[in-house]
């Protein structure tokens, strides 16, 4: 089989000793295998690899066939929002806590990674969400999210009022602490903590989860992944500041009366796993589900 990867980018968790150790091992191991290796410049300074070419995340996405992210899911999310634009394959080495998106063991990555580099891997595409804030019909801010886009108040524990539309059809009005709009990837993140269902990654679906709704009938709902979700913040809230959070990393400012439109992004994350990867095994491991009884 022809080697599918030639140029490999390394991305890490800044200021993390364990991640830096793994990145250093990866760098010299990959160089020994004959690969061209690029280091994301934020972590390159900490590693002291003088022979490494240092690039920003955009150039890494433009030039690499494969990106290896060393860290937790948060690092993977940050990298994925950029790398998904370039259709580069992405795999993770877990140096975080849960690690739903990072498969490789930092202590024993060589064997599984060698097989991946030889072309023995499973691949999937995870769609992203595009969140846009409109004011009087004018686009004011936008960004993408791998996990979820969340409308919430600018201050903690303040109820907000908003209406929800699906593909232009009014669904309901809501008084709550906010609304989570999650992709299947994000269904094991904030959405799960708020009582949402787990969606398997292959589903073309989006789940809406009200945050602490002020009604007993407020329940999560799953809609088609190609739907346009529109949240209209009630103008009666006067000048109360609102925010739209993308993956908890990017915050878009909003005001009462604004329209927040959330739809599937034009690009998707190309995520790869070692051969034989099982999503349900990941759930059992990370969520402490019971093992087989017989």
Image (cartoon, rainbow, N blue to C red):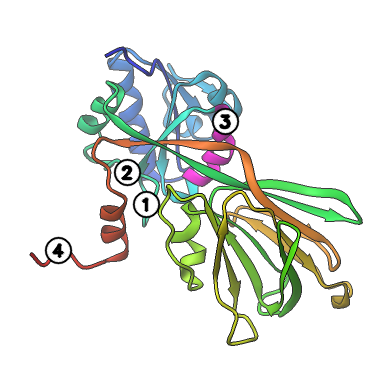
Q: CA distance from mark 3 to mark 1?
A: 21 Å
Per the rendering, the mark at residue 278 is: none
Q: Earlier in the sequence, mark 2 or mark 4?
A: 2
Range drawn in magenta: 76-86
Q: Mark 3 or mark 4: which is in front?
A: 4
Residue 43, above or below 240: above
Per the rendering, the mark at residue 292 is: 4
Rendered-image quadrant of the C terminus:
bottom left
Which residue appears at 50% of the width and 38% of the height?
269
Mark 1: few/some/many CA within 10 Å (<14, 14-19, 20+): some
Rendered-image quadrant of the N terminus:
top left
Between residue 124 and residue 52, name the one nearer to us.
Answer: 124
Q: CA distance from mark 2 to mark 1?
A: 7 Å
Which residue is tagged 3? 57
Residue 109: x %, y % from top left: 25, 35
CB within 8 Å, label 2 to label 1: yes
Q: Earlier in the sequence, mark 3 or mark 1?
A: 3
Left or right position of 129 against 125? right
Between residue 159 and residue 206, name the one nearer to us.
Answer: 206
CB within 8 Å, label 3 to label 2: no
Asked if the magenta segment contains residue 213, the reply would be: no
Farthest right residue in view: 136
Q: Earlier in the sequence, mark 4 or mark 1?
A: 1
Residue 85, above or below 163: above
Per the rendering, the mark at residue 103 is: 2
Q: Earlier in the sequence, mark 3 or mark 2?
A: 3
Q: CA distance from mark 3 to mark 4?
A: 42 Å
Q: Secondary structure at mark 3?
A: helix
Residue 205: x %, y % from top left: 53, 54
Between residue 142 and residue 44, name the one nearer to us.
Answer: 142
Q: CA distance from mark 4 to mark 1?
A: 22 Å
């Amino acid at each position: 089989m022809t080697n599918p990867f030639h140029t490999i980018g390394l991305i890490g968790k800044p200021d993390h000793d364990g991640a830096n150790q793994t990145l250093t091992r990866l760098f010299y191991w990959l160089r020994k295998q004959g690969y061209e290796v690029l280091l994301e410049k934020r972590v390159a300074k900490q590693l002291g690899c003088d022979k490494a070419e240092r690039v920003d995340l955009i150039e890494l996405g433009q030039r690499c066939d494969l990106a290896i992210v060393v860290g937790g899911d948060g690092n993977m999310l940050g990298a994925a929002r950029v790398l998904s634009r370039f259709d580069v394959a992405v795999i993770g080495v877990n140096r975080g806590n849960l690690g739903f998106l990072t498969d490789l063991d930092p202590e024993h990555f060589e064997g599984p990674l060698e097989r991946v580099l030889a072309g023995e891997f499973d691949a999937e595409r995870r769609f992203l969400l595009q969140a846009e804030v409109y004011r009087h019909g004018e686009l004011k801010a936008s960004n993408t999210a791998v996990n979820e886009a969340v409308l919430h108040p600018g201050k903690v524990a303040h109820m907000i009022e908003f209406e929800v539309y699906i593909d232009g059809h009014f669904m309901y009005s809501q008084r709550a602490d906010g609304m989570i709009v999650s992709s299947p990837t994000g269904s094991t993140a904030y959405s799960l903590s708020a009582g949402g269902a787990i969606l398997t990654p292959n589903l073309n679906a989006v789940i809406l989860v009200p945050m602490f709704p002020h009604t007993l009938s407020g329940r999560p709902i799953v809609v088609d992944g190609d739907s346009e979700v529109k949240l209209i913040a009630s103008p009666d809230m006067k000048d109360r500041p609102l925010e739209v959070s993308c993956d908890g990393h990017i915050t878009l400012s909003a005001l009462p009366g604004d329209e927040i439109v959330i739809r599937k992004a034009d690009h998707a994350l190309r995520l790869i796993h070692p051969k034989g990867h099982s999503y349900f095994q990941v759930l059992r491991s990370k969520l402490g589900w019971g093992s087989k009884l017989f």
